[in-house]
Image (cartoon, grey):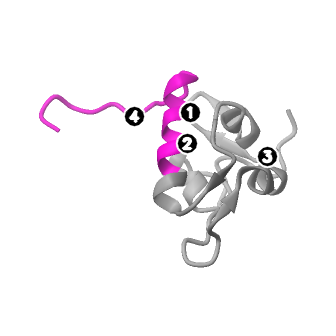
Amino acid sequence: MDWPHDPDGEEGSEGMRKYGQAILAKKLDEEEGFPLSKADFVEEHGDEPIRLNHERVVSVDDIFEHVEEDEFEDIVAFHKAVGRAMRSAGMWEVELSKGA
């Protein structure tokens, strides 16, 4: 797939320092962007890359195919819906240590 920008560049995952949901959050305006329509978000960002780990890159559209909600009231609702979708689709790459 030809991405609109390099997933490891400054517009992507900040030189591979951030992955997954952290990259999605950078695309939001927490104060003025809500309520947010899923369709509007996907229309604007659907073809953009999201790096899940050091090997795997998917598009925003790939993630949002699994999001059930059509609208998000605030950033917390957005994160919860996207997190559920990523986990159910096997795209959740966060590993918690036993003491966390």
Name the side, left or right, on which 59 lies relative to 10.
right
Q: Residue 15 lies in magenta, yes or no?
A: no
Cα–Cα gap, marks 4 and 2 = 14 Å
Looking at the rendered structure, which numbered label has been put on residue 82? 2
Judge whether 53 appears above or below 29 on screen: above
Name the foreground residue: 79 vs 73.
73
Pointer 3 local density, CA inside 10 Å: few below 14, some 14–19, many at least 20 = some
- Provide the residue designation for mark 1: 85
Compare marks 4 and 3 and give the one earlier in the sequence.
3
Compare marks 1 and 3 and give the one earlier in the sequence.
3
State the quadrant of the N terminus.
top right
Cα–Cα gap, marks 2 and 3 = 14 Å
Compare marks 2 and 3 and give the one earlier in the sequence.
3
- The magenta region covers 79-100
Compare marks 4 and 2 and give the one earlier in the sequence.
2
Name the side, left or right, on which 33 lies relative to 4.
left
Tag in front: 2 or 3:
2
* Residue type pointed to by label 1: Ala
Where does residue 43 sit, x and y in percent of width and height?
Answer: 84, 52
* Residue type pointed to by label 4: Val
Q: Secondary structure at mark 1?
A: helix
Judge whether 23 appears above or below 69 on screen: below
Where does residue 7 sit, x and y in percent of width and height?
Answer: 68, 46
Cα–Cα gap, marks 1 and 3 = 15 Å
- Provide the residue designation for mark 4: 94
Q: Secondary structure at mark 3?
A: loop
* Residue type pointed to by label 3: Gly
Residue 25 lies in what quarter of the image? bottom right
- Provide the residue designation for mark 3: 46
Q: Secondary structure at mark 4?
A: loop
